[in-house]
Image: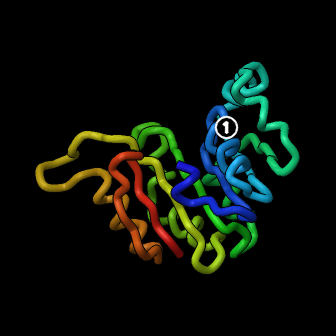
Amino acid sequence: MAQQAVRKGDRVLDCCSGLGYAAIAAHRLGAREVLSIELSPQVMSLRAQNPWSNDLGQEGITQLQGSSYELIVTMAASSFDSVIHDPPRFSLAGELYSEEFYSQIFRVLRRNGRLFHYTGNPHLLRKGSSFVDGVIRRLKSAGFKNVEKVDHLMGVSAQK
């Protein structure tokens, strides 16, 4: 996921970071700063115990516990070069798939900034319309360009 959006020297926002693997990958790709946000205090606790999450303690990675949906509105416009967005499934966090949230991602990205949005491989919601197609429509409505499915990673890439 990180390779889809992150370039050396980037300032990266990792929304819904889970155990932090995407944040660690972004850092290893040469990101100068990574802001990792995770809502669940339990997952934050697991990070501290998980040996594969140890690199989250590296200089250049900042961990925040909280809601990406609430925290992103407090962030300065054009403050990130890339965003990795790996939200929980839609039934648990539909607001993180909303045009409103995508507009906030667009706002915090710098000009030509890149987004990778993991969507998973959800089933068709209704005949002729897939969940991912809805994500793509909302990203475009929020202002993103070059919005494309990345089938092998089960996600969508886009650019500001």
Q: Residue furthest left?
A: 127
56 sits left or right of 141 in the view: right
39 sits left or right of 85 in the view: right
Residue 134 in which image quadrant: bottom left
Rendering coords of residue 89 (x, y %):
43, 39
SS assignment at label 1: loop
Rendering coords of residue 33 (x, y %):
79, 57
Please state which of residues 59 and 30 is positioned toward the viewer in this rendering. Answer: 30
Q: Residue furthest bottom?
A: 111
Way the structure is coloured: rainbow
**Residue at 41% from the left image edge and 46% from the top image edge:** 153
**Residue at 37% from the left image edge and 58% from the top image edge:** 135
**Residue at 75% from the left image edge and 64% from the top image edge:** 9
Rendering coords of residue 115 (x, y %):
53, 62
Height in image: 151 above or below 103?
above
Q: Residue furthest top?
A: 49
Rendering coords of residue 63 (x, y %):
78, 43
Height in image: 36 above or below 128?
above
Q: How many marks?
A: 1
156 sits left or right of 4 in the view: left
Q: Residue furthest right?
A: 59
In this figure, which residue is indicated by the disc labeled 1? 20
**Residue at 32% from the left image edge and 54% from the top image edge:** 132
Please state which of residues 92 and 79 is positioned toward the viewer in this rendering. Answer: 79
Label 1 packing within 10 angstroms: few (<14), some (14-19), many (20+): many
Please state which of residues 130 and 111 is positioned toward the viewer in this rendering. Answer: 111
- Amino acid type for the residue under numbered disc 1: Gly
150 sits left or right of 20 in the view: left
